[in-house]
Image: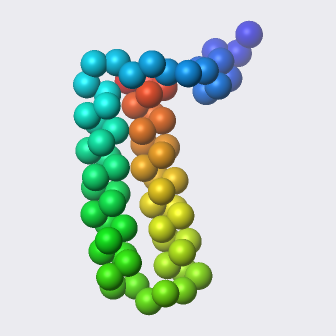
Amino acid sequence: MNAVIENSFRYHTPKDGQPEKYEAIRSKAKELAYLIDELAPNSREKSLAMTKLEECAMWANASIARNG
């Protein structure tokens, strides 16, 4: 059995304090998303920036879930 694979593909029940951390990350990501939306012209690059920001928030929260 590979512990890394097992950890990556199982449900992680939120522990005390984790939901607040998830929300803090999502809130800051949303703040940046609004800034990008306001300042960057509509373009492929803007779309990619938004996608990468979503990925960033998702992976940061996954880090908390899997290792926190």
Which of the 4 image quadrants contains residue 14?
Answer: top left
Q: Is residue 4 visible?
A: no
As drawn, the residue found furthest toward the top would be: 1
Relative to 52, is 13 above or below?
A: above
At 32% from the left edge and 71% from the top edge, which residue is drawn? 34
Give the number of callouts. 0
- The residue at 34%/18% (across/down) is 15
- Report which quarter residue 41 is drawn in: bottom left
Name the foreground residue: 35 vs 2: 35
Q: Position of residue 40 (x, y in %)?
A: 40, 85
Where does the image place residue 19, in percent across and percent down from the top left?
Answer: 31, 31
Q: Image check: 52 left or right of 39?
A: right
Residue 16 shows in this picture: yes
Q: In the image, 29: left or right of 2?
A: left
Q: Quadrant of the C terminus?
A: top left
Q: Residue at x 38, y 78 (%)?
A: 37
Residue 23 in picture, x, y percent from top left: 30, 42
For the N terminus, the image quarter is top right
Q: Position of residue 65 (x, y in %)?
A: 44, 28
User: How are the residues colored?
Assistant: rainbow
Relative to 42, residue 30 above or below: above
Q: Residue at x 30, y 74 (%)?
A: 35
For this orientation, the residue located farthest to the bottom is 41
| 16 sits left or right of 13 in the view | left
18 horizontally vs 41: left or right: left
